[in-house]
Image (cartoon, grey):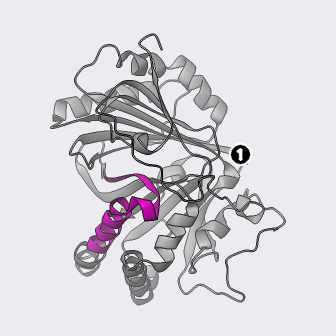
Amino acid sequence: MFELQYSRVVPERRPEGHQPAAPRYSLRWEAPHLTLVGVYFGMQMKGVTRERESAFYARIRAMLAHQDGTSVHEIMKCQDEAGYDNVIVVAYWTDPTLYSRWLINAGFREWFEAQAVDSDGAGYWFEPVVSPYDRHETIYSAPGYQIGFGRTEGAAIVPITTNGFFGAARDRLPLSAVDELESPRRGVMPASATRQSAAGHWLAMVPHNATILRSGQFWEGAGKEQLADYLEQLQPKLMRGMQHLVGQRAETGCLSLRIMTNLNDDGSPRAETSVYATFLSLTQLETWAASHETHLDIYRHAIAMNRLHKEKREVVTWHELFVVQLGNVFEYVNCHPATGILPYVNAMKLDAAG
């Protein structure tokens, strides 16, 4: 299996002699994929109808069916902090050239940019995460459930031992061996912009070394005991942690966070959620994970359940994490001014002519 490794210059976080208490797994590919592309397409409005929701999914899926598109995609929905419904498609490519051709040939750009001129009462957003391989890491609590980039061709989930200690996610990033991955702002959260509206077409620059995380929970098929534990014990702890991240942004560096419900092909909810969040720095996310009670509650409970059930654990947790380099741009058309990372980063409004 392909994996990048550098001769370490930056000290690892792994304690000497550490052996993890529970098995964990990570994603590898049979062939080299040096750039990974995960793209989030969103539509937002208050009180979205099932008809509008289905039409959006169908439109994006039709574009993804182009010869340069991808069959690896998921549909989700959430309600954001401003009370707007957001319907979301996330799509994955492991070939940036194919993705670039898709942008040129599939008609998405023309359609997306047209929404700024011919508003249909909805806002639209487009958040492409383009990351070198050495700036990503993944972890899974079990090897049998493939999701996200794990569904791309040639992907395999393999055992790892770089887990079970604070700082493990950083150690799993190949680039962390030679780069401190520091935020240029040194964790100082920008003041929120005071825009009254985000009408029109806005470009938002993702900060260098920002951390983008998708963290999932899948409990379909869990038995009565483990299902009850997840819904009554672990899930409330997860939600308290998410509330802290967005409620204390100056401390956590949380630029954006969406708690999404994954959907079946027919639009019905799955027994699965995922959190999609962007942080100013990896250090701030690590600090929360290692020291704040809201995350320690999650961590201690998950460890206890893993020790209790071992390989019979029926609730799968996972994440894919990217520390992106300068150059990623998110786009927002006729969205409310608190959408995504728009309030906290350098943003530029395009004129009607583009």
Image coords of residue 326 (percent x, y): 64, 42
Q: Residue lying furthest top in this view? A: 353
Residue 44's image quarter?
A: top left
Q: Main secondary structure of the magenta part?
A: helix
Image coords of residue 338 (percent x, y): 33, 42
What stretch of residues is rendered in magenta? 235-259
Q: Is residue 271 magenta?
A: no
Q: Is residue 143 visible?
A: no
Residue 40 falls left or right of residue 270: right
Q: Residue lying furthest right in this view? A: 7
Residue drawn at point x = 71 percent, y = 45 percent:
34
Which residue position is annotated with label 1?
34
Residue 131 falls left or right of residue 331: right
Residue 264 falls left or right of residue 307: left
- Work out which quarter of the rendered image holds the N terminus and state it: bottom right
Residue drawn at point x = 55 percent, y = 57 percent:
321
Give amino acid for label 1.
Leu
Image coords of residue 212 (percent x, y): 51, 52
Residue at disc 1, secondary structure: loop
In the depicted view, which residue is nearer to us: 34 or 48?
A: 48
In the depicted view, which residue is nearer to us: 125 or 54?
A: 125
Residue 327's image quarter?
A: top right
Residue drawn at point x = 43 percent, y = 44 percent:
341
- Circle 1 packing at 10 Å, graded few (<14), some (14-19), many (20+), is some
Residue drawn at point x = 41 percent, y = 39 percent:
342
